[in-house]
């Protein structure tokens, strides 16, 4: 009787389809929300966009910020500019920006502040808001620039600084004299589940 129960349970377990919850990758998210038809690792998007899309060193709403591969970011990273807070801070939406084996892995984080720390204000070096410490992270990340969506020109579509009241939620943290306040935490949403 016991052997037949074990065999029955094993048969049910083996016959039950297991649906893995795949983590949403940054490239998949950026491609889905911008419509850019670029493939491959995130760090390759800069060269892949050459001749297909406009590129530049200034953020615009809806543009994709391309991070170089560096350190533990073997595949680079991409994020989508939501809006600008000022000439040195943008808010981005991106997926899978979390340390391995952490709760944020594979999820989308929205309105995450990114600070331009490059000496020439060319967005070649940035620091990204780190929620656990309520500050910009200690790492400086190298970027290649921004890939712009089709139909966006340098006129009229550049991200413009948002009003402080639109950017800062009830709880905020001062970061620099140039930027009044930044959100103390970015929103994190669940990654969509794969369709069976």
Image: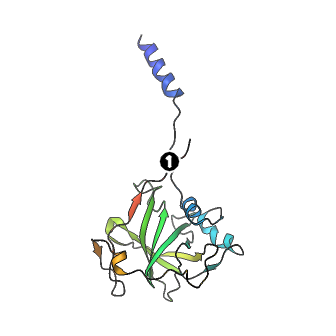
In the rendered view, does 167 fall on the left or right side of 32? Answer: left
> Picture coordinates of residue 3 (x, y %)?
45, 14
Q: Quadrant of residue 68?
A: bottom right
Outermost residue toward the right in this view = 51
Numbered marks: total: 1
Which residue sits at x=49%, y=84%?
Answer: 118
For label 1, the SS is: loop
> Picture coordinates of residue 58 (x, y %)?
55, 82
Number of residues whose C-alpha sits closer than 10 Å to that of mark 1, classed few (under 14), some (14–19) or many (20 or more): few
* Quadrant housing the N terminus: top left
> Picture coordinates of residue 190 (x, y %)?
43, 54
Q: Is residue 81 above or below residue 15?
A: below
Q: Nearer the viewer, residue 71 or 85?
A: 85
* Quadrant housing the C terminus: top right
Q: Quadrant of residue 42?
A: bottom right
Q: Nearer the viewer, residue 70 or 192?
A: 192
Outermost residue toward the top in this view = 1
Outermost residue toward the left in this view = 171
Q: Is residue 1 above or below residue 79?
A: above
Which residue sits at x=29%, y=74%?
Answer: 172
> Picture coordinates of residue 33 (x, y %)?
55, 63
Which residue sits at x=64%, y=75%?
Answer: 151
Identify the residue under disc 1: 193
């Amino acid at each position: 009787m016991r052997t037949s129960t074990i065999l029955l349970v094993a048969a049910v377990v083996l016959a039950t389809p297991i649906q893995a919850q795949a983590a949403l990758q940054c490239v998949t998210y950026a491609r889905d929300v911008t419509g850019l038809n670029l493939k491959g690792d995130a760090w390759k998007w800069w060269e892949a966009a050459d001749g297909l899309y406009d590129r530049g060193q200034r953020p615009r709403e809806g543009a994709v910020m391309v991070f170089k591969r560096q350190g533990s970011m073997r595949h680079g990273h991409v994020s989508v500019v939501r809006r600008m807070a000022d000439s040195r801070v943008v808010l981005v939406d991106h997926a899978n920006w979390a340390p391995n084996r952490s709760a944020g892995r594979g999820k989308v984080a929205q309105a995450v502040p990114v600070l331009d720390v490059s000496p020439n204000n060319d967005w070649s070096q940035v620091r990204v808001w780190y929620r656990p410490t309520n500050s910009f992270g200690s790492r400086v990340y190298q970027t290649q620039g921004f890939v712009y969506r089709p139909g966006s020109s340098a006129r009229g579509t550049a991200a413009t600084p948002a009003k402080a009241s639109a950017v800062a939620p009830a709880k905020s943290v001062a970061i620099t004299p140039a930027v009044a306040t930044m959100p103390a935490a970015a929103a994190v949403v669940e990654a969509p589940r794969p369709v069976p």
